[in-house]
């Protein structure tokens, strides 16, 4: 726009005839202003010859009452910068270190000592210095090159606070020290206090436990060392690594290290997980840390053994139902997996989990919480009680400024406060991606539901009776393959075997695990391709996905025409809203390029590594810029688990070809069939 005209002094306008045309309008405005600022009357009467002098006591009324009206009338008001941002005294503190961070959050007051001060801008005054300042002045004063407003009411309030100062507990004091701010005022940290905070935010190497049956990747070593450091210091941890980065392994390594250090002798470890993850946790501990004794506390016949295991595995439901029993036991650490289950602070489940006392707490979550800070508060309050204050205080101090006003300074302060206790690495992080293989495969285990177990036992009993009576080798092999097909369908979902066409996901342990896995992938904004051998199972999956996420996925099966198939692939590759692609193994197992997906789920398995690999390679191939996470769903205690173990052990199966299919299973003897297929 055009440059502003240079302002004319009011004295010129009153005395110079060249301004006659403008004089009346200006004087009308001045008269209006004089109603709110009476000194203007005398100023105009004197020809605006001498500036208006304001006493310090009168300056606040001008700045806070008159100036807004001047600006409201469209009149520019030019003030010195320092006067435009008046400082006000605020209660603050000086924080000094007491010692090394070794006693934990509940005693964090042992880390620091503090003295109350008064902050004026960046300056800190002792109570005595503040009294000297306010004793000789009021209103607006100059102080160290800045203008300070000494409001009598605020001064009286400050004096009362200094006489009866609030006493922050250990958690609040640590938050203040990390934020370097109290009530909007800067906090002064001495060099030793800064050194303590540096110790809290730096992670030194920790030797992995001797009994760990796994090699930790570099980023996992850092996560394990961080968890161990926090546990030893008594601090809680929220480990929020992306799905597929091995949070469970890092936590198991930490628990094993505690045992090897003798830290699980008095208090044990309690791990609380969703029901669908109970089996996975038991298997992962047995696989990676066989030195950790483990028991599962779940089901109608659950009981707490007299000789306590190192790790007790239970579910959120059991923790709520048996809270009284669990509260009576000594726990060195309580771990919660899928911590979004305690994101609602008002829920009975959250309250129950938080009521279990322990030496330290670990929350695991692969779901980002950056946009839902109240949920983050609930999870962090489990890990470090009181660390972020009350929910109402947290909303006022952090959530509202960050989410509503996008206040960068508050966001940075929030990061300073939470940094020692929150670890989140993404698969895309440069420090992580170089450590990752291109393809991460993970077997994920589920349990049969009661209905599935009864159906499985009944079908197996009849099938084994018929097979035992068949003498023709060719006919016998056909019967074995029929039995495999039936039991696979039962493990998938009873409705598939019973050919019902529909059924609730809750009737199948595998269906529940699948949907929870999809929740995590969905929350990470990633795409996934899902393989099943059965068209009818694909239809069931599509229905559940549509109900869960409000949108049914595309399903590519053998009945899809070539042109339509190409359109489906193009849409999945390029449409951000297409997050899930269902494929039957035979229709989609070869010849497709689906590199938009960074996850592959095998809902049911072909029991042939070569066939599975061909299917997985739809996502994992040239052009894939992300690491691919492969999830293989397996039903525990069934033939699925036993055959998977046989293949993993390469018991004479190393030379399987793509065409071999499941024929080899038909060659097992009657006794071997009974052993492999029976529930255990």
Image: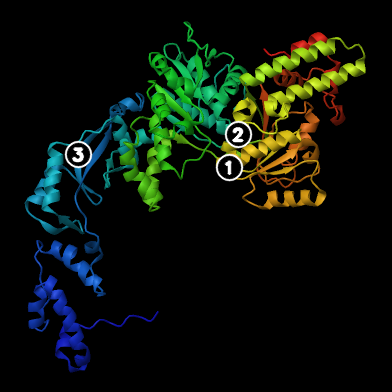
Is residue 669 in view from this perspective?
no
Measured from the top left, where is residue 415 in percent x and y?
41, 42
Q: Is residue 189 left or right of residue 143?
A: right
Residue on which the image places disc 1: 549
Q: Position of residue 187 (x, y in %)?
A: 27, 43
Q: Earlier in the sequence, mark 3 or mark 1?
A: 3
At x 80% / y 8%, what residue is drawn?
671
Q: At which x and y percent is residue 139?
A: 12, 58
540 displayed left or right of 611? left
Identify the disc placed on residue 116.
3
The mark found on residue 515 in the picture is 2
Would residue 6 be visible to someone looking at this image?
Answer: yes
C-alpha gap between disc 3 and disc 1: 53 Å
x and y percentages locating residue 87 in the rendered image: 21, 55
Q: Secondary structure at mark 2?
A: helix
The answer to which quarter of the image holds residue 581 is top right
| Along the viewing direction, whichever of 561 and 400 lies nearer the viewer | 561
Of marks 3 and 2, the one in the foreground: 2
Query: In the image as oriented, which residue stretches furthest toward the front?
Result: 500
Give the colouring mode of the picture.
rainbow
Q: How many marks?
A: 3
Report how far apart the C-alphas of labels 1 and 2 lie in the structure.
Answer: 10 Å
* First reached walking from the N terminus: tag 1 or tag 2: 2
| Label 1 packing within 10 angstroms: few (<14), some (14-19), many (20+) | few
Residue 31 vertical placement versus 226 (above, below): below
> What residue lies at 45% left-to-right and 27% top-to-bottom?
362
**Which quadrant holds residue 441?**
top right
Quadrant in the picture for the N terminus: bottom left
């Amino acid at each position: 726009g055009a440059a502003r005209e240079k302002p004319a002094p009011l004295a010129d306008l009153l005395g110079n005839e060249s301004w006659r045309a403008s004089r009346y309008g200006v004087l009308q405005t001045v008269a209006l202003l004089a109603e709110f600022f009476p000194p203007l009357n005398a100023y105009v009467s004197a020809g605006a010859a001498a500036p208006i002098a304001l006493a310090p006591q009168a300056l606040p009324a001008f700045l806070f009452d008159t100036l807004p009206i001047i600006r409201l009338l469209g009149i520019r008001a030019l003030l010195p910068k320092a006067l435009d941002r008046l400082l006000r005294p605020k209660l603050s503190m000086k924080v000094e270190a007491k010692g090394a961070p070794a006693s934990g959050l509940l005693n964090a007051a042992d880390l620091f000592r503090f003295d109350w001060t008064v902050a004026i801008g960046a300056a800190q005054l002792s109570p005595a210095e503040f009294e000297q300042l306010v004793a000789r002045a009021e209103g607006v004063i100059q102080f160290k090159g800045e203008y300070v407003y000494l409001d009598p009411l605020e001064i009286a309030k400050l004096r009362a606070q200094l006489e009866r100062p609030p006493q922050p507990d250990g958690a609040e004091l640590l938050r203040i020290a990390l934020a370097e701010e109290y009530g909007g005022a800067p906090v002064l940290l001495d060099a030793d206090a800064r050194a303590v905070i540096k110790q809290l935010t730096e992670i030194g190497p920790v030797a992995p436990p001797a009994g760990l049956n796994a090699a930790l990747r570099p980023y996992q070593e850092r996560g394990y060392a961080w968890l161990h450091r926090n546990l030893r210091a008594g601090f809680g941890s929220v480990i929020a690594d992306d799905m597929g980065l091995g949070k469970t392994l890092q936590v198991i390594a930490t628990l094993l290290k505690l045992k090897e250090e003798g830290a699980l002798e008095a208090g044990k470890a309690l791990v609380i997980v969703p029901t669908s993850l109970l089996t996975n946790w038991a298997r992962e501990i047995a696989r990676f840390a066989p030195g950790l004794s483990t028991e599962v506390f779940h089901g109608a016949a659950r009981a707490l053994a007299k000789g306590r295991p190192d790790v007790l595995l239970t579910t959120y439901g059991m923790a709520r139902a048996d809270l009284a029993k669990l509260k009576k036991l000594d726990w060195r650490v309580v771990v919660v997996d899928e911590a979004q289950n305690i994101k609602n602070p008002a829920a009975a489940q959250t309250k129950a989990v938080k009521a279990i006392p322990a030496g330290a707490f670990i929350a695991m979550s692969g779901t980002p919480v950056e946009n839902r800070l109240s949920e983050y508060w609930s999870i962090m309050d489990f890990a470090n009680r009181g660390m972020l204050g009350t929910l109402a205080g947290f909303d006022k101090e952090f959530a509202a400024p960050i989410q509503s006003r996008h206040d960068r300074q508050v966001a940075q302060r929030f990061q300073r406060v939470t940094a020692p206790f929150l670890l989140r690495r993404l698969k895309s992080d440069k420090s992580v991606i170089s450590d990752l293989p291109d393809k991460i495969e993970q077997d994920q285990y589920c349990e049969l539901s009661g209905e599935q177990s009864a159906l499985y036992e009944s079908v197996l009993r009849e099938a084994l009776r018929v097979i035992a009576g068949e003498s023709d080798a060719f006919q016998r092999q056909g019967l074995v393959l029929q039995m495999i097909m039936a039991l696979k369908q039962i493990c998938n979902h009873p409705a598939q075997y019973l050919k019902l066409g529909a059924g609730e996901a809750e009737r199948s342990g595998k269906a529940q695990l699948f949907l929870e896995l999809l929740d995590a992938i969905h929350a990470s904004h990633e795409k996934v391709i899902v393989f099943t051998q059965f068209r009818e199972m694909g239809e069931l999956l599509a229905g559940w996905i549509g109900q869960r996420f409000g949108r049914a996925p595309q399903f590519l099966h053998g009945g899809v025409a070539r042109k339509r198939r190409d359109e489906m692939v193009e849409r999945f590759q390029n449409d951000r809203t297409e997050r899930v692609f269902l494929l039957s193994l035979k229709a989609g197992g070869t010849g497709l390029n689906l590199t938009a997906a960074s996850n592959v789920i095998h809902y049911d398995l072909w029991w042939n590594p070569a066939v599975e690999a061909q299917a997985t390679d739809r996502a994992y191939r040239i052009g894939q810029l992300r690491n691919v996470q492969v999830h293989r769903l397996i039903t525990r205690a069934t033939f699925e688990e036993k055959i998977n173990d046989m293949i993993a052990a390469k018991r004479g199966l190393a030379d399987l070809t793509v065409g071999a299919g499941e024929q080899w299973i038909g060659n097992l003897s009657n006794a071997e069939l009974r052993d492999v297929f029976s529930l255990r």
